[in-house]
Each structure stands twice: as C-alpha cells, then as structure tokens.
C-alpha cells in the first residue's frame, strides 16, 4: 500500500504545492449570495470541489462548518469527500481531534478506516493530552496509508502560552511535539506520513524542524496575513517539506469557478516560486 507521504509527494509534484481549505462560514456564504443553511452549504462546497478538485493537490474541509448543520451537514461532507477522491485530490479533514484510549481509537476509526463514510487521506490532531495519546491515530493511519498532521506552532496568539512553555529538559512543548513526530517519520522515503501544523504568520520560530521528514502544513496564507515569501522566514531549510494552505484568499474569488481556479493558480505559482519545483 502506498503511504500517505509518498502519495502527497507524488500529487504535489503533479499538481503543485497547494492546499485549499473549504471553510463555508456564514460570511463567505453571504458573499457568494447563498443562504446560511444546508442548501447553501451544499452549493458552496460542490462549487469548490468542481472548480478545484482536479486542479489542487490537497483539499482541506473544515469539519466544524459542516457539523454545525447537524446530520445533513455531515452528509454533505461525506458527499464532497467522495467527489474529491473521484477527482484525484487528497483530502485532509481539519478536525483537530485529540483524546485518550478508546475515544481516540474511535476518532481514528471515523476518519482513517476505509470502511467509514468519513474516510479521508489525512486528519489534523491536537497533541495536548500528550503525543503518545494519539498513537491509535498514527497506527491506523500507517495501516491504511493515511496521514496525521499534529498541531505544533499555531498562529493564534493564545497558543504561545502552551506551545512555547519549557519542560524539565529545556525544550519547549512545541519542540517536544516536533521531535516525537520526527521519530515516527525516521527512515521514510520520499516523505513520512506524520506531519505538523506550523502557522505561516508566526515569523522566525527558534524551533528545529530539520529532522521532521514529514509534511509541514502552513495555514494562514492570504487573507490571514501571511505571504508566500513569509514561508522562507518560518521554515528556512525545511521549505521543501512545506504544504502551503489558503482558504479565504481563494474562496473569496467565488462563486465563479473560473475565478476560483485563477486564484488557486496564482497562489500555487507564488508558492512554487518560493518552495522550488515545478508542475
């Protein structure tokens, strides 16, 4: 079975270094002239998928914006996951789950077991019950060729109090997370399947990402304030592993599919110029 890291490496080579979020919050629905209901959600999500599903390497639906409509919203999420798979995009579900024991195993089954209707290529996860608490996610991902992106250094100002706190060994909490994920990816080729989330707006981090050997998801580009050029400052020598992520900057170009594709193409070109490579 092809690992997620290998699949991601191949798809980014073919389509370019870009992840696009599907974040249908009320303001974007209104901007598109859609009602804040399940029908508006479905039209929004379907338009993004049809415009970008065969163009972009990774599509990242934000689960909360579907869950808030209840079971009908989750049904829309299930539908777009299937559509994206049909179009060849990798699906990264932004759920930021984190728990212990049987509960984290249940989360893993929900998203990383091929028998689930919510089965995706990768998920985001929170490590703040200890990175080891996520072991069932890592194990099921490895078994079925999936990936897990663990929060490390996020853009929200509240995160620093936890992530940059120092432990008994002198390392920050974030560096401990980084080092544990690096251990999981040791020896993987061309890329490990366990990734990290590092915000593109945080500037020079003072943290060592050089041994991660896995994908580095960089949200915060575009409308949230970061530019592709900022990736050099945040990631330095780890740039080749970065997966830049845009949401509002691209989604605001809708609902015209051609405008969405043009916005995604511009973003991918800007990132490619910084990260190197071609597609």
Image (cartoon, rainbow, N blue to C red):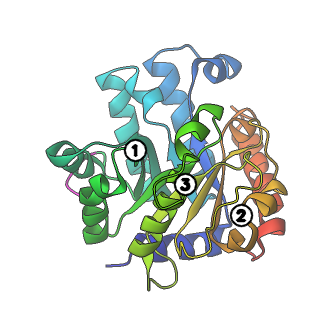
**In this rendering, is residue 163 above or below 279?**
above
Residue assigned mark 1: 128
- Residue 113 in the image: x percent, y percent? 23, 57
Name the one closer to the observer, 153 or 206: 206
In the rendered image, which quarter is residue 134 located in?
Answer: bottom left
How many neighbours does mark 3 have within 10 angstroms: few (below 14), some (14-19), or many (20 or more)?
Answer: some
- Residue 142 in the image: x percent, y percent? 30, 70
How many neighbours does mark 2 have within 10 angstroms: few (below 14), some (14-19), or many (20 or more)?
Answer: many
Say whether residue 216 is visible.
Answer: yes
Mark closer to the chain start, 1 or 3: 1
**In this rendering, is residue 54 above or below 69?**
below
**In this rendering, is residue 180 above or below 71?**
below
Q: Is residue 161 left or right of residue 192?
A: right
- Please tell me which residue is depicted at 57% across the width and 24% down the height of the picture: 25
* Residue 172 tag number: 3
Q: Compute the Cα span from label 1 to label 2.
A: 23 Å
Q: Nearer the viewer, mark 1 or mark 3?
A: 3
Residue assigned mark 2: 235
* Residue 51 tag number: none
Dot 3: what SS?
A: loop
Q: Main secondary structure of the magenta part?
A: loop
Q: Which residues are magenta?
A: 112-117
In the rendered image, which quarter is residue 15 located in?
Answer: bottom right
- Residue 274 in the image: x percent, y percent? 82, 66
Mark closer to the chain start, 3 or 2: 3
Name the one closer to the observer, 103 or 222: 103
Residues at discs 1 and 3 in contact (Cβ within 8 Å): no
Name the one closer to the observer, 164 or 257: 164
């Amino acid at each position: 079975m092809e690992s997620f890291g290998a699949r991601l490496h191949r798809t980014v080579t073919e389509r370019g270094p870009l992840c696009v979020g599907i974040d249908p919050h009320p303001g974007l629905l209104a901007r598109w002239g859609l009602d804040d209901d399940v029908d508006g959600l479905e039209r929004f999500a379907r338009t993004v998928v049809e415009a970008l599903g065969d163009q972009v390497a990774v599509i990242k639906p934000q689960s909360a914006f579907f869950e808030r409509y209840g079971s009908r919203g989750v049904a829309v999420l299930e539908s777009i996951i299937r559509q994206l798979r049909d179009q060849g995009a990798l699906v990264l579900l932004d759920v930021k789950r984190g728990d212990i024991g049987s509960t984290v195993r249940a989360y893993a089954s929900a998203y990383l077991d091929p028998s689930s209707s919510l089965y995706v290529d990768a998920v985001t996860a929170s490590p703040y019950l200890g990175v080891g608490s996520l072991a069932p996610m890592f194990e099921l991902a490895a078994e079925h060729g999936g990936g897990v992106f663990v929060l490390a250094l996020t853009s929200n100002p509240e995160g620093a109090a936890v992530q940059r706190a120092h432990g008994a060994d002198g390392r920050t909490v974030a560096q401990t997370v980084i080092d544990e994920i690096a251990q999981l990816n040791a020896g993987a080729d061309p890329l490990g399947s366990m990734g990290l989330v590092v915000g593109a707006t945080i500037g020079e981090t003072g943290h060592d990402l050089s041994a991660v050997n896995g994908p580095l998801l960089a949200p915060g580009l575009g409308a949230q304030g970061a530019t592709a050029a900022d990736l050099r400052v945040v990631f330095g020598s780890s740039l080749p592993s970065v997966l830049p992520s845009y949401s509002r900057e691209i989604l605001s170009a809708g609902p015209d599919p051609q405008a969405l594709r043009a916005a995604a193409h511009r973003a991918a070109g800007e990132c490619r110029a910084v990260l190197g490579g071609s597609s």
